[in-house]
Image: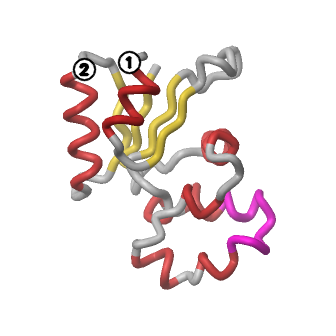
Amino acid sequence: MLVVYTYKNCDACRRAVKWLAAQGLVYVEKPIRDTPPSPAELRVMLGILGGERRRLCNTSGVDYRAEKLGEQLATLAEADFLGRLAANGNLIKRPFLLRDFAPDSSPAALVGLVGFDPVAWEAALCA
């Protein structure tokens, strides 16, 4: 199952959803501001991103700058970092896509993508 978290006013999100539909991929779209990814989903994505916290964040967002999250990335405990993101979807880079996130999923089947890069999405989802 593909789950993609989007924001309605985000051009990259609109392009990503349009791309998914053009590929004939079935997905569930969730509004990232109203229902942000859970700490467990964020932890999985952080692992996929090699632990690079900054890549998980919407660094150009107003909330990111207002909370001075960039200055805290290295010192926040992982649980605190993930909790803050899970509480405020504005802090998360979007679109945010996970495939096969479930307790019984094979780690090999798991795919996670943040931001929309059609070449990367093609390689991850259509190969």
Q: Nearer the viewer, residue 125 or 82?
A: 125
Q: Nearer the viewer, residue 115 or 42?
A: 115
Q: Nearer the viewer, residue 32 or 50?
A: 50
Q: Which mark is residue 19?
A: none
**Structural distance between the alpha carbons of marks 1 and 2:** 8 Å
Quarter of the image containing the C terminus?
top left
Specify whether 79 is left or right of 22: right
Residue drawn 46% across and 76% down? 63
Q: Is-magenta flag for residue 66?
A: no
Residue annotated with mark 1: 126
Specify few, some or many for label 2: CA neighbours under 10 Å numbering under 14, 14-19, or 20 or more.
Answer: few
Q: Measured along the vertical axis of the image, is residue 57 above or below residue 26?
A: below
Q: Is-magenta flag for residue 77?
A: yes
Q: Secondary structure at mark 2?
A: loop
Residue drawn 55% across and 58% down? 55
Part of the protein shown in magenta: 73-83
User: Residue 28, image x and y in percent?
Assistant: 36, 28
Residue annotated with mark 2: 23
User: Label 2 sits on what residue type?
Assistant: Gln
User: Residue 71, image x and y in percent?
Assistant: 65, 82
Q: Measured along the vertical axis of the image, is residue 3 above or below residue 38?
A: above
Specify whether 110 is left or right of 124: right
User: Residue 96, image x and y in percent?
Assistant: 45, 44
* Marks 1 and 2, the one that precedes in the sequence: 2
User: Label 1 sits on what residue type?
Assistant: Cys
User: Residue 87, image x and y in percent?
Assistant: 56, 60
Q: Are marks 1 and 2 in contact (CB under 8 Å)?
A: yes
Q: Secondary structure at mark 1?
A: loop
